Image (cartoon, rainbow, N blue to C red):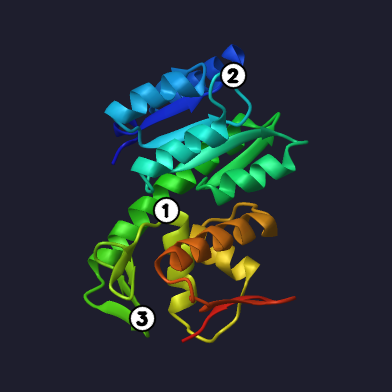
Amino acid sequence: MDNNDHVIAIVDDEENIRETISYSLKQEGYKALTFSDGSYAWESFQKKMPDLIILDIIMPRMDGLELCRKIRSISETVPIIFLSSKDEELDKILGLEMGGDDYLCKPFSMKELITRIKVIFRRVKNIKEIDKNANELINIGDLSIDQLSYTAKWKDKKLTLTLTEYMLLLALSKYPGHVKNREQLIKEAYSENIYLSDRTIDSHIKRLRKKFIEIDPEFCCIETVYGLGYRFTV
């Protein structure tokens, strides 16, 4: 898919940020939609979801966390990149736990934002290309992963996962019982040399566990190995 096939939504109440990001995206060949608050964006997203959303956290009428929650109620797959101020650590973590894929702190480098957007789109493309060559399910106990459709089931019930959650689950389940540290998980889930904090991975793992527990309250197969990382057990 060429860049000009991708539609990216920018949701931010600061006009200069919307215009700057929009201009940069168009220079890269993307199509850009801009919204000044979450309510306007939500009205649009219910009709048609963009391919990626850049989402500010603090906005009037409907903030980014609430909009993320609404987006995830109808789509787990659209990637979301949060924008936040440096003093909003709690909001950043909450955003990731609600289903955000990545975040950048304001002020941010436009070059870094474009790089992270390209990384996400490459991840989507790479998963599809890899899965074309996969002709069997991964079955580990009650977990089943279909690499052709990049979906997962637990006890025959479908898990609705974001791209990042799917990649993390795949990384853990391919080597059950083996401990994967956060650096390894970042490398396998993102497949790009970009900086992510340990807290980012922890937030995604927490959300992934929550989805298993919603299906099976006794789920305990994703273990934290303190001081090391995580492992999937059967």
Q: Nearer the viewer, residue 134 or 103?
A: 103
**Circle 1: element type:** loop
Give percent across and percent down for residue 233: 50, 84
Q: Residue at 58% of width from left, 56% of height from top? A: 193
Secondary element under disc 3, as helix, strand or loop, is loop
Q: CA distance from mark 3 to mark 1?
A: 20 Å
Q: Which residue is mark 1?
A: 162
Q: Residues within 10 Å of mark 2 (few under 14, many from 20)?
A: few
Residue drawn at 35 percent across, 32 percent down:
50
Q: Nearer the viewer, residue 57 or 125?
A: 57
Question: In the picture shown, does residue 30 fall above or below 15?
Answer: below
Q: Please, which residue is most extreme toward the front here?
A: 217
171 w.r.t. 151: above or below: below
Locate the N terminus and report the quarter of the image it occupies. Answer: top left
Q: Residue at x 46, y 21 (%)?
A: 39
Disc 3 versus disc 1: nearer the observer: 3
Q: Nearer the viewer, mark 1 or mark 2?
A: 2
User: Can residue 169 be seen from the camera position used here?
Assistant: yes
10 Å neighbourhood of mark 1: few (<14), some, or many (≥20)? many
Q: Give the CA distance from mark 2 to mark 3.
A: 44 Å
Identify which residue, 57 or 212, lies in the foreground: 212
**Picture coordinates of residue 93, whole percent (x, y):** 65, 48
> Residue 42: where, in percent of width, then height?
40, 26
Q: Is residue 18 left or right of residue 79?
A: right
Q: Earlier in the sequence, mark 1 or mark 2?
A: 2
For disc 3, the marked residue is 142
Q: Is residue 2 left or right of residue 57?
A: left
Q: Quadrant of residue 136?
A: bottom left
- Amino acid of disc 1: Thr
Q: Name the mark on residue 218.
A: none
Residue annotated with mark 2: 60
